[in-house]
Image (cartoon, helix red, strand yellow):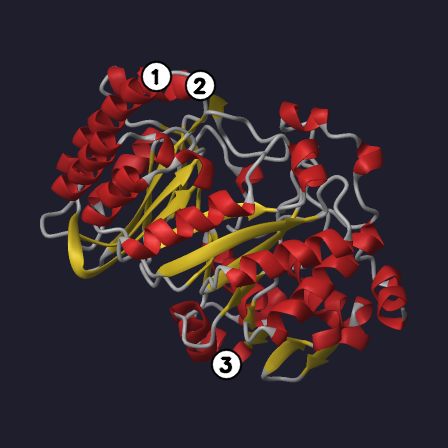
Amino acid sequence: MEQIAQLARLGLFDARVPRYTSYPPATVFSTETGAGFQAECLRGLDPAEPVSVYVHIPFCERLCWFCACRTQGTTSLTPVAAYLETLKAELALVAPLLPKGLRMGQLHWGGGTPTILTPDMITQLAGAIKGVFTPTDDLAFSVEIDPTLVDDDKIAALAAAGMTRASIGVQDFAPKVQDAIGRHQSFAQTKACVDSLRAAGITSLNADLVYGLPHQTAARLTASIDQVLALDPDRIALFGYAHVPHMSKRQKLIKDADLAGDQMRFQMAQGAATQFAVAGFQAIGIDHFARPDDTLAKAADNGGLRRNFQGYTDDNCRTLIGLGASSISSYRAGYVQNAAATPAYSERIAAGQLPGARGHRHSDSDRLQARVIEMLMCNFTIDFRVLESEFDAPLAALDGAVTRIRTQFAEVIDLTSDHLRITDAGRPLTRIIAQAFDAYAPSGAVYSKAS
């Protein structure tokens, strides 16, 4: 209770802040930066540096009420097939802009529900991507899997396409919670999916859980975690539910009264972290956990942990190319997001135009602040010596933020001339402390709870 009182006094339960999967956050993106900048960035890629590729499949047979992702429901494969052709057309537009010899080191399919694709569609899409981006010998290929919408044939097609990691959505196994979020998925279905993946040779497994869901209690979350641990995953992501009905209309189906209070949310997250630790998992950043021999844990240990739009990653590619509606590309020069609505995205492609609709061109200060925030989000420490070696610009630009942090959070930080480190007790405040280095405060932007 003493820690909760301290965190409450320091603002944890009042703050709404970005998740900082990017800096600046996507709320800063402007339509002044779009397709022209996208083409410029693609042409300027260094062929000696492998890139990551993300493909967004926005379709779902069911729309989970808690989800705020860019998705759309469908009961037919007709729009999915049309979308696949549009993805191929986008690849055809991107291909001539790429330097010869460029390779792909990471590939991720997300959504939506990538496993809505038929086996033939999976094969077609994988072939089209590899026809433009030559894979490296050690390509890491991950796919988000819905256990209720996958079968042995789809898994076989994904394995044949080179998938190396499966990311399985669980959220919570409690029936009352599933009723309240419109997502019914039994443990038996999930285990059958895991067994099929492993039989196909996909041994690397990530499981996603969410705390703070309607009707969720500490006991229900503990029971769900026990079931997830029985599946023996290599990584687990535990995300806090972001209730943003002003952004996601389907969340209006979730009643505020059914949600846990801020302190209960915090206690659920802390209890889950303890449960993972007892099971032998290493805490990674603010919301991931991994077996000590997993590459994510190794990256955290050797300073190679990174933060991108999917969360924490061991991906060391400096460029992420997003394909599909709403996908965001990350280049050294800045970000570009494709048109978010599927019809608008498809119209741009049909007109022979790159689909970049908004974005942000980085300034020198953006790059410095982004690196500082990533250090905090990944390692809970700003290493001033490393920053001085990476940036020619003086670090005096950080002085104001450091002073504010020292004043407001003195009891949970360790500050020397070499570093600013968040103590173990202060780690729940990481996003709030990181915001001190955020130079952007968009009018009207409403972020998720820091707790």
Q: Which residue is mark 2?
A: 74
Mark 3 to mark 1 CA distance (whole Å) = 52 Å
Residues packed near mark 2 inside 10 Å, few (<14), some (14 to 19) or many (20 plus): some
Q: Picture quarter containing residue 137?
A: bottom left
Q: Residue at x 71, y 25 (%)?
A: 252
Q: Is residue 133 above or below residue 238?
A: above
Could one spot residue 448 in this view of the protein? yes
Could one spot residue 146 in this view of the protein? no
Element type at mark 2: loop
Q: Which residue is mark 1?
A: 79
Q: Residue at x 64, y 60 (%)?
A: 434
Q: Nearer the viewer, mark 3 or mark 2?
A: 2
Looking at the picture, how far across and down is residue 109, in whole percent? Answer: 35, 42
Residues packed near mark 1 inside 10 Å, few (<14), some (14 to 19) or many (20 plus): few
Element type at mark 3: helix
Q: Is residue 149 above or below residue 73?
A: below
Residues at marks 1 and 2 touching, judged by CB atoms closer than 8 Å: yes
Q: Is residue 23 left or right of residue 270?
A: left
Q: Residue at x 57, y 38 (%)?
A: 27
Residues packed near mark 3 inside 10 Å, few (<14), some (14 to 19) or many (20 plus): few
Quarter of the image with the C terminus is: bottom right
Upstream in sequence: badge 1 or badge 2: 2
* Residue type highlighted by circle 2: Thr
Upstream in sequence: badge 3 or badge 2: 2
Looking at the picture, how far across and down is residue 282, in whole percent? Answer: 54, 73
Q: Which residue is mark 3?
A: 385
* Residue type highlighted by circle 1: Pro
Looking at the picture, how far across and down is residue 28, in whole percent? Answer: 56, 39
* Residue type highlighted by circle 3: Arg
